[in-house]
Amino acid sequence: MSADLEAIVRDRVAQVVDDVEPQDLDLTTDLAHEYGLTSLNKVLLLTSVCDDAEVALSHFTEHDVAAMRSAADVVAALAAHSRQGAKA
């Protein structure tokens, strides 16, 4: 797992979720159930992390997005399509 991608996801999730610092984020926790992320928040989160990681959002289908339940899932999905992930 790329540390750069993880940092991007941690920072962006912390911007969306109240009262969670990037370093305190549990990457394996379900973002909707534990952190209250709505579907709209998830789309906005993915849009911003894709922009930051220079990964086209078009790489992901609706099914792919639905399968991204945790921050770790998001990092893994980005890594599969990122130059940063290829370096890890």
Image (cartoon, rainbow, N blue to C red):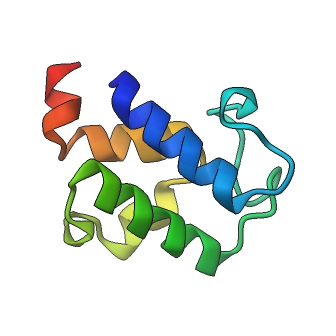
The picture places residue 80, in percent across and down from the top left corner, at: 22, 41
Give residue 48's quadrant in the image: bottom left
Work out which quarter of the rendered image holds the C terminus and state it: top left
Against 87, residue 49 (above or below) is below
Q: Quadrant of residue 15?
A: bottom right
The spot of residue 5 in percent (x, y) is: 37, 36
Horizontally, residue 35 falls left or right of residue 69, namely right
Left or right side of 1 for 15: right
Q: Residue furthest bottom?
A: 40
* x and y percentages locating residue 74 in the rendered image: 45, 47
Decide if residue 86 is on the left or right side of residue 42: left
Res 18 quadrant in image: bottom right
Residue ID at (70%, 47%): 30
42 or 3: nearer the viewer: 3
Quarter of the image that includes the N terminus: top left
The residue shown at (79%, 43%) is: 20
Number of numbered discs overlaid on the protein picture: 0
**Relative vertical location of residue 3 with respect to residue 17 in this rendering, above or below:** above
